[in-house]
Amino acid sequence: MTYSRIIGTGGYLPEKVLTNADLEKLVDTNEAWIYSRTGIRERRIAADDEFTCDLAERAALNAIEAAGILNNEIDLIVVATTTADQVFPSTACLLQHRLGIEGPPAFDVQAVCAGFLFAIDVADKFIQTGSARCALVVGAETFSRIIDWSDRRTCVLFGDGAGAVVLKVDNEPGILSTHLHCDGKYKDLLYVPVGVSRNFDRIKTGTAFTTMQGGEVFRWAVTAMSDIVDETLDANGMSRDDIDWLVPHQANIRIINAVGKRARIPAEKVVVTVDRHGNTSAASVPLALDEAVRDGRIQSGQHVLIEGFGGGFTWGSAMIRM
Ligand code: COA
């Protein structure tokens, strides 16, 4: 059998830190409210001249260095992003050029905060079917660009960043399974009502903002991300005790804690970065994975369940043997 295996991870956060105290100066909010309702203390914000591809490049270079490969060994690039630098070329194409790679496929996928799971799934299938041998998979966002910084209901939640993994072909797994879902009937609960084809004038006036029914999104995120734990375990004939680490999408500590409780995964096995990163959308899972690999919590041979949830709704998971 042919499998894909993670051989390197990387992450990058922009330098600028935006604390809850900073937000108190922008909107009618306070540290106590933000921390108690979300678990977020601070988030990073890209500089004015820093774009999603810049973040993606830094994370990718970290992952490539950790993997110990040459850039030209990469024969597939998949970038998960909702905040592409340009309408086209894709961020993946821009990144490919930055990395000095010519020829192999490079494309973006868009599933908002579940995007990295979609990107991993696609890259894993390319490798399993022999269409690629070494894939760079990136989640990168400048979500701060689609936030209304005068709306306290949303602006306290999000941040910018990028995470990446290098996947390589192997006879041993690797990625044991991937699981993806979408349900577009929830399109009006979490969305940006602006695109190239629709309401484009709002892009020109800089008012293309994230809109959300927070309570509804919260409930769905908990249900979807806890149910998919069972789906993932069943697909692999595993029990919850077999999970060494859960790396969930980092949207809100209360969502993460509720998922852990409902899925019966002890808090000590759950990787949390939301306190320092906020919700970095497609970057949140690879950033959290990278942090726990680099600080030595996640060890080779362990089983890691990664999962995401986002607008659409979209949700997904992967069971990984590191
Ligand atoms: N500071 C202070 N007060 C705030 C506030 C802020 N930043 N944002 C909202 N409030 C107020 C509300 O206006 C409301 O006041 P009211 O009762 O006078 O109307 C009150 O706080 C309670 O709001 P509520 O929406 O009930 O709070 P909550 O406990 O549901 O928490 C969220 C709100 C947004 C933190 C929570 O619903 C959530 O995290 N949802 C999921 C969001 C998410 O993760 N989205 C991305 C998923 S990928």
Image (tube, grey):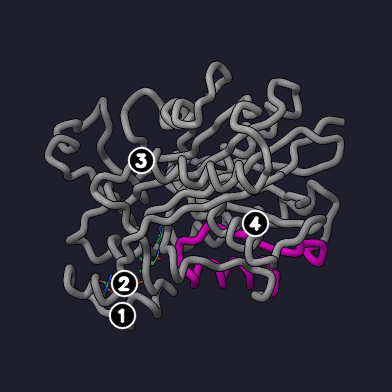
The amino acid at mark 3 is Thr
For the residues labelled 2 and 3, the Cα–Cα distance comes to 22 Å
The amino acid at mark 4 is Asp
Beta carbon at label 3 within 8 Å of ligand 1: no
State the residue position of label 4: 227
State the residue position of label 3: 83
Sequence-first tag of 2 and 1 = 2
Kindly state the secondary structure of the residue where label 3 is placed: loop
Q: Residue at x 14, y 35 (%)?
A: 204
Q: Residue 139 at what x, y percent from top left?
A: 50, 44
The amino acid at mark 2 is Thr
The reply to whether callout 2 and callout 1 are in contact (CB within 8 Å) is no
Disc 4 packing (10 Å; few <14; some 14–19; many ≥20): some
Q: Is residue 21 left or right of residue 228?
A: left
Marks 2, 4: nearer the viewer: 2
Q: Residue at x 64, y 75 (%)?
A: 267
State the residue position of label 2: 19
Sequence-first tag of 3 and 1 = 1
The reply to whether callout 4 and callout 3 are in contact (CB within 8 Å) is no
Q: For residue 185: magenta?
A: no
For the residues labelled 2 and 1, the Cα–Cα distance comes to 9 Å
Q: Residue 42 at what x, y percent from top left?
A: 37, 70
Magenta stretch bounds = 240-266
Marks 4, 3: nearer the viewer: 3
Q: Is residue 187 left or right of residue 262?
A: left
Sequence-first tag of 2 and 4 = 2
State the residue position of label 1: 31
Kindly state the secondary structure of the residue where label 1 is placed: helix
Q: Residue at x 25, y 44 (%)?
A: 49
Marks 1, 4: nearer the viewer: 1
